[in-house]
Amino acid sequence: MTTPDFTFSQHSIQDFLDCQRRFLLRHVLRLAWPAAETDDQAAYELHQEQGQAFHRCLQQYFSGIPEEAITSSITDELLAGWWRNFLGEARGFPWNIAGNPPPGLMLLPEFTLTAHLGDHRVSAKYDLVAALPGEHFWIYDWKTSRSIPPREKLEPRVQTRLYSWLLAAAGSGLNAGTDITPDQISMTYWYVQHPARPISFAYSSEQFTSDRQQLGDLLDYIAGIPEADFRLTDDPVQCRFCTYRSYCERGFAPGVWSDLSGESDLSSVLDNLPEWEDSSPLEL
Ligand code: SF4
Protein backbone atom coordinates (compact mmCIF):
# COMPACT_ATOMS: atom_id res chain seq x y z
CA MET A 1 0.00 0.00 0.00
CA THR A 2 2.82 2.44 0.79
CA THR A 3 4.59 4.07 -2.17
CA PRO A 4 8.39 3.93 -2.72
CA ASP A 5 8.80 7.52 -1.53
CA PHE A 6 6.95 6.85 1.75
CA THR A 7 9.10 7.43 4.84
CA PHE A 8 8.32 5.41 7.95
CA SER A 9 8.84 7.02 11.34
CA GLN A 10 8.41 5.75 14.88
CA HIS A 11 5.09 7.63 15.01
CA SER A 12 3.70 6.00 11.88
CA ILE A 13 4.92 2.52 12.86
CA GLN A 14 3.55 2.92 16.39
CA ASP A 15 0.25 4.08 14.90
CA PHE A 16 0.17 0.93 12.77
CA LEU A 17 0.72 -1.25 15.84
CA ASP A 18 -1.95 0.67 17.79
CA CYS A 19 -4.44 0.72 14.92
CA GLN A 20 -3.84 -0.23 11.29
CA ARG A 21 -6.67 2.03 10.11
CA ARG A 22 -5.17 5.06 11.87
CA PHE A 23 -1.87 4.44 10.12
CA LEU A 24 -3.69 4.46 6.79
CA LEU A 25 -5.79 7.55 7.51
CA ARG A 26 -3.09 9.66 9.14
CA HIS A 27 0.10 8.73 7.34
CA VAL A 28 -0.88 7.37 3.92
CA LEU A 29 -4.11 9.17 3.05
CA ARG A 30 -3.24 12.17 5.27
CA LEU A 31 -6.88 12.67 6.12
CA ALA A 32 -7.53 15.77 8.21
CA TRP A 33 -10.50 15.16 10.50
CA PRO A 34 -11.60 18.02 12.76
CA ALA A 35 -12.49 16.30 16.03
CA ALA A 36 -11.20 16.88 19.55
CA GLU A 37 -8.90 14.19 20.94
CA THR A 38 -9.95 14.82 24.55
CA ASP A 39 -12.86 16.28 26.52
CA ASP A 40 -10.68 19.18 27.69
CA GLN A 41 -9.14 20.40 24.49
CA ALA A 42 -7.78 23.54 26.16
CA ALA A 43 -5.79 21.46 28.68
CA TYR A 44 -4.62 19.13 25.93
CA GLU A 45 -3.45 22.01 23.75
CA LEU A 46 -1.72 23.65 26.72
CA HIS A 47 0.08 20.36 27.34
CA GLN A 48 1.14 20.35 23.67
CA GLU A 49 2.42 23.91 23.84
CA GLN A 50 4.32 23.34 27.09
CA GLY A 51 5.90 20.18 25.70
CA GLN A 52 6.95 21.92 22.51
CA ALA A 53 8.29 24.91 24.47
CA PHE A 54 10.33 22.61 26.72
CA HIS A 55 11.84 20.86 23.71
CA ARG A 56 12.67 24.30 22.23
CA CYS A 57 14.43 25.37 25.45
CA LEU A 58 16.61 22.28 25.39
CA GLN A 59 17.33 22.68 21.69
CA GLN A 60 18.48 26.24 22.39
CA TYR A 61 20.56 25.11 25.35
CA PHE A 62 22.37 22.42 23.37
CA SER A 63 22.85 24.85 20.48
CA GLY A 64 24.88 27.10 22.78
CA ILE A 65 22.38 29.76 23.87
CA PRO A 66 23.33 30.86 27.41
CA GLU A 67 21.33 29.27 30.21
CA GLU A 68 20.45 32.70 31.67
CA ALA A 69 18.97 33.91 28.36
CA ILE A 70 16.72 30.86 28.17
CA THR A 71 15.71 31.21 31.83
CA SER A 72 14.71 34.85 31.39
CA SER A 73 12.60 34.04 28.31
CA ILE A 74 10.36 31.59 30.22
CA THR A 75 7.09 33.04 31.52
CA ASP A 76 5.07 29.87 32.10
CA GLU A 77 5.34 28.66 35.71
CA LEU A 78 5.15 24.95 34.89
CA LEU A 79 7.74 25.30 32.16
CA ALA A 80 10.01 27.23 34.53
CA GLY A 81 9.83 24.31 36.98
CA TRP A 82 10.65 21.80 34.25
CA TRP A 83 13.57 23.95 33.16
CA ARG A 84 14.90 24.06 36.74
CA ASN A 85 14.54 20.27 36.95
CA PHE A 86 16.53 19.91 33.76
CA LEU A 87 19.30 22.27 34.85
CA GLY A 88 19.56 20.45 38.17
CA GLU A 89 20.01 17.06 36.54
CA ALA A 90 21.94 18.13 33.43
CA ARG A 91 25.00 18.59 35.56
CA GLY A 92 24.92 14.88 36.32
CA PHE A 93 24.64 13.69 32.74
CA PRO A 94 27.72 11.86 31.43
CA TRP A 95 28.25 14.54 28.78
CA ASN A 96 27.79 17.45 31.19
CA ILE A 97 28.29 20.62 29.19
CA ALA A 98 27.82 22.91 32.16
CA GLY A 99 30.89 21.44 33.86
CA ASN A 100 33.78 19.87 32.05
CA PRO A 101 32.65 18.14 28.83
CA PRO A 102 35.03 15.57 27.37
CA PRO A 103 37.10 16.82 24.40
CA GLY A 104 35.51 16.02 21.04
CA LEU A 105 31.97 15.83 22.41
CA MET A 106 29.31 16.78 19.84
CA LEU A 107 25.80 17.72 20.98
CA LEU A 108 23.15 17.36 18.28
CA PRO A 109 19.68 18.48 19.39
CA GLU A 110 16.67 17.74 17.16
CA PHE A 111 18.89 15.56 14.99
CA THR A 112 17.25 13.74 12.08
CA LEU A 113 18.60 10.58 10.49
CA THR A 114 17.23 8.63 7.53
CA ALA A 115 18.22 5.26 6.11
CA HIS A 116 16.93 2.43 3.97
CA LEU A 117 15.81 -0.82 5.49
CA GLY A 118 15.27 -3.24 2.64
CA ASP A 119 13.03 -1.44 0.17
CA HIS A 120 11.78 1.03 2.76
CA ARG A 121 12.92 4.41 3.93
CA VAL A 122 12.89 5.06 7.68
CA SER A 123 13.56 8.24 9.57
CA ALA A 124 13.91 9.33 13.18
CA LYS A 125 14.16 12.72 14.81
CA TYR A 126 16.19 12.50 18.00
CA ASP A 127 15.68 15.00 20.81
CA LEU A 128 19.42 14.80 21.43
CA VAL A 129 22.35 12.73 20.28
CA ALA A 130 25.49 13.32 22.36
CA ALA A 131 28.37 11.90 20.35
CA LEU A 132 31.88 11.16 21.49
CA PRO A 133 33.32 9.75 18.24
CA GLY A 134 35.09 6.43 18.64
CA GLU A 135 33.73 6.02 22.15
CA HIS A 136 30.07 6.43 22.93
CA PHE A 137 26.83 7.81 21.50
CA TRP A 138 24.02 8.77 23.89
CA ILE A 139 20.49 9.08 22.59
CA TYR A 140 18.20 11.17 24.78
CA ASP A 141 14.45 11.52 24.55
CA TRP A 142 12.71 14.14 26.69
CA LYS A 143 9.33 13.21 28.11
CA THR A 144 6.91 15.60 29.80
CA SER A 145 4.24 13.11 30.88
CA ARG A 146 3.31 12.99 34.55
CA SER A 147 3.80 9.26 34.89
CA ILE A 148 6.60 6.89 33.92
CA PRO A 149 5.73 3.69 32.08
CA PRO A 150 7.33 0.47 33.35
CA ARG A 151 10.74 -0.26 31.89
CA GLU A 152 9.51 -3.53 30.40
CA LYS A 153 6.93 -1.60 28.37
CA LEU A 154 9.45 0.95 27.10
CA GLU A 155 12.07 -1.57 26.01
CA PRO A 156 10.10 -3.19 23.14
CA ARG A 157 8.52 0.07 21.97
CA VAL A 158 9.12 1.07 18.36
CA GLN A 159 10.88 4.25 19.43
CA THR A 160 13.46 2.37 21.51
CA ARG A 161 14.08 -0.24 18.82
CA LEU A 162 14.10 2.12 15.83
CA TYR A 163 16.19 4.94 17.31
CA SER A 164 18.99 2.66 18.44
CA TRP A 165 18.98 0.57 15.27
CA LEU A 166 18.98 3.61 13.00
CA LEU A 167 21.94 5.24 14.73
CA ALA A 168 23.98 2.05 14.39
CA ALA A 169 22.87 1.54 10.79
CA ALA A 170 23.30 5.07 9.48
CA GLY A 171 25.24 7.13 12.02
CA SER A 172 28.75 6.76 10.58
CA GLY A 173 28.70 10.46 9.67
CA LEU A 174 28.96 11.15 13.39
CA ASN A 175 31.89 8.77 13.80
CA ALA A 176 34.39 10.05 11.24
CA GLY A 177 32.94 7.77 8.55
CA THR A 178 33.29 4.59 10.60
CA ASP A 179 30.23 2.50 11.48
CA ILE A 180 29.03 2.98 15.04
CA THR A 181 29.02 -0.40 16.77
CA PRO A 182 25.82 -1.20 18.68
CA ASP A 183 27.65 -1.50 21.99
CA GLN A 184 28.70 2.14 21.65
CA ILE A 185 25.06 3.22 21.83
CA SER A 186 22.70 3.79 24.74
CA MET A 187 19.26 5.34 24.82
CA THR A 188 17.71 7.21 27.73
CA TYR A 189 14.17 8.38 28.34
CA TRP A 190 14.35 11.35 30.66
CA TYR A 191 11.14 12.41 32.40
CA VAL A 192 11.16 16.05 33.35
CA GLN A 193 8.61 15.49 36.13
CA HIS A 194 10.81 12.69 37.53
CA PRO A 195 14.27 14.05 36.79
CA ALA A 196 16.16 11.61 39.01
CA ARG A 197 14.54 8.54 37.45
CA PRO A 198 15.82 8.24 33.86
CA ILE A 199 15.34 4.92 32.11
CA SER A 200 18.30 3.82 30.00
CA PHE A 201 18.91 0.93 27.61
CA ALA A 202 22.32 -0.26 26.46
CA TYR A 203 22.41 -1.51 22.86
CA SER A 204 24.10 -4.69 21.60
CA SER A 205 24.98 -6.53 18.36
CA GLU A 206 22.39 -9.21 19.12
CA GLN A 207 19.67 -6.61 19.59
CA PHE A 208 20.77 -4.78 16.43
CA THR A 209 20.40 -7.99 14.37
CA SER A 210 17.05 -8.75 15.94
CA ASP A 211 15.76 -5.19 15.41
CA ARG A 212 16.80 -5.16 11.77
CA GLN A 213 14.98 -8.43 11.17
CA GLN A 214 11.84 -7.50 13.06
CA LEU A 215 11.56 -3.95 11.73
CA GLY A 216 12.27 -5.14 8.18
CA ASP A 217 9.62 -7.87 8.41
CA LEU A 218 7.11 -5.40 9.83
CA LEU A 219 7.69 -2.80 7.10
CA ASP A 220 7.44 -5.50 4.40
CA TYR A 221 4.17 -6.60 5.95
CA ILE A 222 2.74 -3.06 6.11
CA ALA A 223 3.77 -2.29 2.54
CA GLY A 224 1.99 -5.41 1.30
CA ILE A 225 -1.44 -4.69 2.81
CA PRO A 226 -4.07 -3.52 0.29
CA GLU A 227 -5.81 -0.28 1.28
CA ALA A 228 -9.12 -2.00 2.02
CA ASP A 229 -7.48 -4.41 4.49
CA PHE A 230 -6.12 -1.98 7.09
CA ARG A 231 -8.12 -3.17 10.11
CA LEU A 232 -9.80 -1.05 12.77
CA THR A 233 -8.36 -1.70 16.21
CA ASP A 234 -10.19 -3.84 18.76
CA ASP A 235 -8.78 -1.69 21.59
CA PRO A 236 -11.39 0.88 22.67
CA VAL A 237 -8.75 2.95 24.51
CA GLN A 238 -7.11 3.79 21.19
CA CYS A 239 -10.43 5.04 19.80
CA ARG A 240 -11.22 7.14 22.87
CA PHE A 241 -8.38 9.54 22.14
CA CYS A 242 -8.35 9.28 18.35
CA THR A 243 -9.41 12.13 16.12
CA TYR A 244 -11.00 9.69 13.63
CA ARG A 245 -13.63 8.41 16.11
CA SER A 246 -16.63 9.76 14.23
CA TYR A 247 -15.12 8.86 10.85
CA CYS A 248 -14.75 5.25 11.97
CA GLU A 249 -18.12 5.29 13.75
CA ARG A 250 -16.42 4.50 17.06
CA GLY A 251 -18.35 7.13 19.02
CA PHE A 252 -18.43 10.91 19.16
CA ALA A 253 -17.46 11.71 22.77
CA PRO A 254 -13.72 12.35 23.21
CA GLY A 255 -11.66 10.62 25.90
CA VAL A 256 -11.23 12.12 29.36
CA TRP A 257 -8.11 14.27 29.53
CA SER A 258 -7.44 13.62 33.21
CA ASP A 259 -7.29 9.86 32.45
CA LEU A 260 -4.78 10.41 29.67
CA SER A 261 -2.54 12.80 31.55
CA GLY A 262 -2.45 10.80 34.76
CA GLU A 263 -2.24 7.08 33.97
CA SER A 264 1.08 5.42 33.20
CA ASP A 265 -0.49 2.74 31.06
CA LEU A 266 -1.89 5.44 28.77
CA SER A 267 1.43 7.21 28.35
CA SER A 268 2.07 5.52 25.00
CA VAL A 269 -1.23 6.95 23.75
CA LEU A 270 -0.18 10.42 24.92
CA ASP A 271 3.27 10.08 23.38
CA ASN A 272 1.82 9.21 20.01
CA LEU A 273 -0.80 11.92 19.72
CA PRO A 274 -0.21 14.08 16.64
CA GLU A 275 1.78 16.94 18.16
CA TRP A 276 4.99 14.94 18.08
CA GLU A 277 5.02 14.29 14.32
CA ASP A 278 8.45 14.19 12.74
CA SER A 279 9.43 17.09 10.52
CA SER A 280 11.17 16.73 7.17
CA PRO A 281 14.05 14.29 7.30
CA LEU A 282 17.62 15.27 6.56
CA GLU A 283 19.74 12.55 5.00
CA LEU A 284 23.31 12.15 6.17
S1 SF4 B 1 -11.14 5.71 15.74
FE1 SF4 B 1 -10.32 3.75 16.45
S2 SF4 B 1 -10.49 2.42 14.66
FE2 SF4 B 1 -10.64 4.52 13.90
S3 SF4 B 1 -8.58 5.13 13.35
FE3 SF4 B 1 -8.92 5.79 15.43
S4 SF4 B 1 -8.13 4.13 16.72
FE4 SF4 B 1 -8.43 3.32 14.67
Image (spheres, helix red, strand yellow):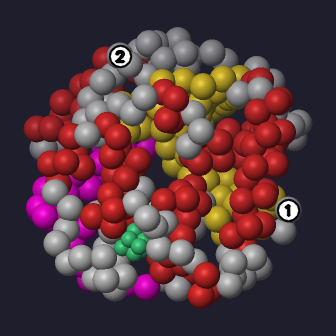
Report crowding for label 1: few under 14, some 14 to 19, many 20 or more residues within 10 A (C-alpha).
some
Decide if residue 90 is on the left or right side of residue 20.
Answer: left
Residue 73 appears in which quarter of the rendering? top left
Residue 207 drawn at (x, y percent): 76, 33
Classify the position of the C terminus by image quarter. Answer: bottom right
Q: Which residue is mark 1?
A: 118
* Magenta residue check for 3: no
Report crowding for label 2: few under 14, some 14 to 19, many 20 or more residues within 10 A (C-alpha).
some
Q: Which residue is mark 2?
A: 196
Q: Earlier in the sequence, mark 1 or mark 2?
A: 1
Q: Where does the magenta region start and end?
A: 31-60
How far apart are the alpha carbons under marks 1 and 2?
Answer: 39 Å
Decide if residue 17 is on the left or right side of residue 268.
Answer: right
The reply to whether discs 1 and 2 touch (Cβ–Cβ < 8 Å) is: no
Residue 176 appears in which quarter of the rendering? top right
Q: Main secondary structure of the magenta part?
A: helix
